[in-house]
Image (tube, helix red, strand yellow):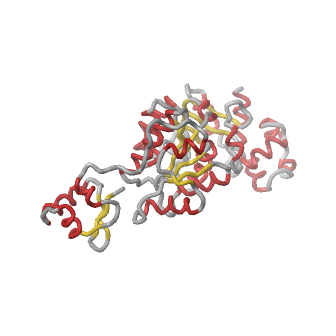
């Protein structure tokens, strides 16, 4: 078994030999041992000359050794296409990875799953929505898939864990590089009760080009994707596009027309995503049992000034008139709410609740 894995790593860890080339070679030469024995001239009949040249140079022996040592530790797994543990859902993505590196229980990769994604800079209510939707969906038996990022992703993972459910974090780094580091404790919890998974080899640092590749796996593992908050150029929209291409349902939570974090969701809804204002919208669409209580976006803020403010931008004078308090008192309350991140200051002397 170790010899087979070592041979496969010597093929898949070669820089410049991507998943599509790997799979062509493995099929043409009946597995990794055959690829390694093949003459360069024969390899060139299957893949481009530069790929054949890279294969002839070979993989870094030290990386192969480190990966074998990593895979020998408890709860560390290399899941190869064709294995029983390889998730069938990923065979529907564009160029599925030849192998996955998993920490935790890779069986969760094949369970019925739902993806929740959104902004790294989500508002307080966006984080609450992500966590509450995740908790409710986990309670009906769905594994929650997300990307371990700050903001909505982390809230979605926590919601599933709070519900004593399972969650899968798809990483854009190697399995030995938790990113962001601030989510290291969360990653440990996920590994204990779900699975961390990546297609990137050991030592791969966070890089901008990795995350679109990561996103296609987030959507690929799931029945559907919910976008909670997203700016117009958000990476979450990439995940949603992959989901649509893969035949998955796409859901989006609408928000204030004045909020930049609503623009991405509104764009998705215009393009055909299903508008969601409660978890039952999702459950009924998926043909699952509805919950006893309905989750809605509308939440009455506990602060009276926020209640008076509502959802739309207002001026200081308008707020003073609504609450009937003095200018100094209202200004002091606004300053406190701004420091707490519950109010945003807009151009033109206007204020808006940070929804």
Picture residue at 40% right of the left edge, 48% below the top: 127
In front of the other: 160 or 86: 160
In front of the other: 102 or 165: 165
**Considering only vertical position in the picture, is 160 above or below 296?**
above
- Percent coordinates x, y for residue 6 in the rendering: 70, 33
- Percent coordinates x, y for residue 69 in the rendering: 59, 30
Specify whether 26 is left or right of 61: right
Q: Is residue 146 visible?
A: yes
Q: Is residue 188 visible?
A: no
Task: Please give the count of numbered marks on the rendered protein.
Answer: 0
Answer with the quarter of the image where residue 36 lies: top right
- Percent coordinates x, y for residue 347 in the rendering: 31, 72
Image quarter (top left, top right, bottom left or bottom right) of the N terminus: top right
- Percent coordinates x, y for residue 11 in the rendering: 72, 42
Answer with the quarter of the image where residue 85 lies: top right
Specify whether 186 is left or right of 47: left
Picture residue at 49% right of the left edge, 37% below the top: 291
Answer with the quarter of the image where residue 13 lies: top right
Image quarter (top left, top right, bottom left or bottom right) of the C terminus: bottom left
Picture residue at 26% right of the left edge, 71% below the top: 349
């Amino acid at each position: 078994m170790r010899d087979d894995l070592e041979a496969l790593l010597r093929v898949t860890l070669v820089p410049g030999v991507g998943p599509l080339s790997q799979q062509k070679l493995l099929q043409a030469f009946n597995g990794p041992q055959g690829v390694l024995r093949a003459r360069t001239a024969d390899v060139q009949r299957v893949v481009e000359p530069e790929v054949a040249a890279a294969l002839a140079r070979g993989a870094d022996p030290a990386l192969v050794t480190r990966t074998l040592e990593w895979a020998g530790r408890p709860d560390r797994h290399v899941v190869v296409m064709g294995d029983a543990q390889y998730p069938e859902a990923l065979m529907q993505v564009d160029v599925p990875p030849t192998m996955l590196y998993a920490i935790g229980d890779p069986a969760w990769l094949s369970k019925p799953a739902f993806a929740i994604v959104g902004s790294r800079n989500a508002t307080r209510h966006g984080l609450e929505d992500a966590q509450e939707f995740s908790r409710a969906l986990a309670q009906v038996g769905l594994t929650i898939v997300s990307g371990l990022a700050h903001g909505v992703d982390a809230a979605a993972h926590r919601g599933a864990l709070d519900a004593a459910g399972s969650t899968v974090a798809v990483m854009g780094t190697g399995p030995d590089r938790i990113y962001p580091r601030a989510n290291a404790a969360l990653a440990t919890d996920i590994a204990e009760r779900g699975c961390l998974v990546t297609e990137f080899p050991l030592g791969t640092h966070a890089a901008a080009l990795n995350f679109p590749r990561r996103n296609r796996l987030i959507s690929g593992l799931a029945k559907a994707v919910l976008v909670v908050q997203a700016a117009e150029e958000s990476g979450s929209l990439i995940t949603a596009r992959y989901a649509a291409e893969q035949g998955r349902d796409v859901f989006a939570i609408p928000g204030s027309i004045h909020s930049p974090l609503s623009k991405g969701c509104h764009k998705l809804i215009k393009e055909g995503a299903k508008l969601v204002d409660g978890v039952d919208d999702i459950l009924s669409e998926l043909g699952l049992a509805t919950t006893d209580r309905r989750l809605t976006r509308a939440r009455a803020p506990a602060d009276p000034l926020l209640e008076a403010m509502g959802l739309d931008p207002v001026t200081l004078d308008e707020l003073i008139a609504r609450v009937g308090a003095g200018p100094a008192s209202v200004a002091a309350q606004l300053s406190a709410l701004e420091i707490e991140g519950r109010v945003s200051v807009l151009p033109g002397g206007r204020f808006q609740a940070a929804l």
